[in-house]
Image (spheres, helix red, strand yellow):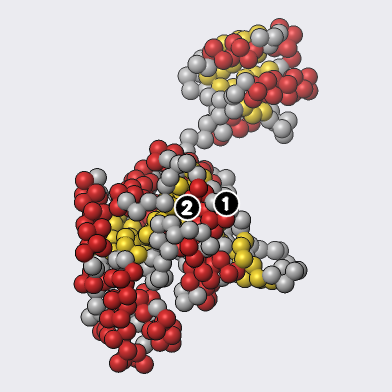
Amino acid sequence: MAIQIPRGTQDILPGEVEKWQLIEETAKEICRKYQYQEIRTPIFEQTELFLRGVGDTTDIVQKEMYTFEDRGGRSLTLRPEGTAAVVRSFAENKMYGGANQPVKLYYLGPMFRYERPQAGRYRQFVQFGIEALGSMDPAIDAEVISLAMELYKALGLKKLRLVINSLGDSESRTAHRNALINHFQPRIDEFCGDCQNRLEKNPLRILDCKKDHNHELMKTAPSILEYLNEDSRLYFEKVKQYLSAMEIDYVVDSTLVRGLDYYNHTAFEIMSEAEGFGAITTLCGGGRYNGLVREMGGPDTPGIGFALSVERLISAMDAEGVDLQSEKKIDCFIVALGEEARDHSVILLQNLRHAGFSAERDYLERKIKAQFKAAERLGANFAIIIGEDELKSGVAAVKNLETGEQKELTLNNFVKEFSMLSQ
């Protein structure tokens, strides 16, 4: 029986991978403009990192992690998301002590979650995210949101909806937490087991429940915005002020939450409103997490970031009909006729590549017509024709495949003359 790809994974083949490369290049260029630097962390980490950094009451930790013991008996987990590892690295490498603050980082790489595969969702997926650590200025909250919006728009998405909320500071959250417990407790037996477990541990997570989201108590649950103290309210007003100044449209949604205790103040999601995108519309989620660095053993350092799935991004682009196919052209294709010409083409090809040209030759000893067809399929700008007659004359014919114009260049000085011709 043939071996097949594991469920929930995908092969990204030539012809499709170019789209991924363009997305990655666009993300990296925008990060360069915003002064975010790349960080690369291990594919697997100690399981304890995600218990602390993601939260033991989350579906990710309880149901979706790929966890295993190594030969030393240590519990390790394939990373299900990027923030925890970045914050661990920030604390472990004492990046908080550097001269340039805040520390602005981005990551791009595969993550792993054991969940039901569906359109745009895989068990191995690629996540892009940014983290800004070391500033409590609401302007950096607006900057993080702005970067995410700019990326989506640079990739051609138009049907976007930005939703924001404030979770307040610890005082505001404590007041809201108590209000949620009082609200849900009398009828908690009507909710799923997960919600019942979360009531005392983390009642904010009840608002995220997918099973009971239509329960009438969900609609009447106390809003965090009703419990913001003055400092939290002013902070949120500043974030909204900066977004408006940047001409970034947003909607305030008091039900948008981040369920862990160290999340506070700004929370946001970006959603696709493209027709046919699917029932789950969220493309990107982010927020402020001022207690996470301390949880990882570092000093009390504020942070904010977001993460997005590249697969979900591509699904949204498909739903909007965005075509990101790159120009797959090469500079030249060597058409060689006869064994001596083929031998010479090997050296000529290497010289052209060393000079910076994208070049190819025939490796199947095809006839001249088939070689020209191959050049056409590769989108070659020029065909370089070498045969016995050309070798005797010390020249090669160069044909512009767009105009049909043909010239002869000397083989001894070919690369220099071709450089001038192709400008």
* Picture quadrant where residue 312 is located: bottom left
Which residue lies under the disc numbered 1? Answer: 93
* Picture quadrant where residue 177 is located: bottom left
State whether residue 220 is above or below residue 257: below
State whether residue 323 is above or below residue 192: above
Query: Label 1: how many residues lie within 10 Å, few (<14), some (14-19) or many (20+)?
Result: few
Residue 344 point in image, percent of width and height: 74, 19
Horizontal relation, residue 295 to residue 350: left or right: left
Q: Nearer the viewer, residue 89 or 187?
A: 89
User: In the image, what residue type sits under mark 1?
Assistant: Asn
Q: Residue at x 64, y 29 (%)?
A: 360
Q: Which residue is drawn at 56% across and 66% down?
A: 49
Horizontal relation, residue 148 to residue 47: left or right: left
State whether residue 107 is above or below residue 400: below
Which residue lies under the disc numbered 2? Answer: 128
Residue 236 point in image, percent of width and height: 25, 59
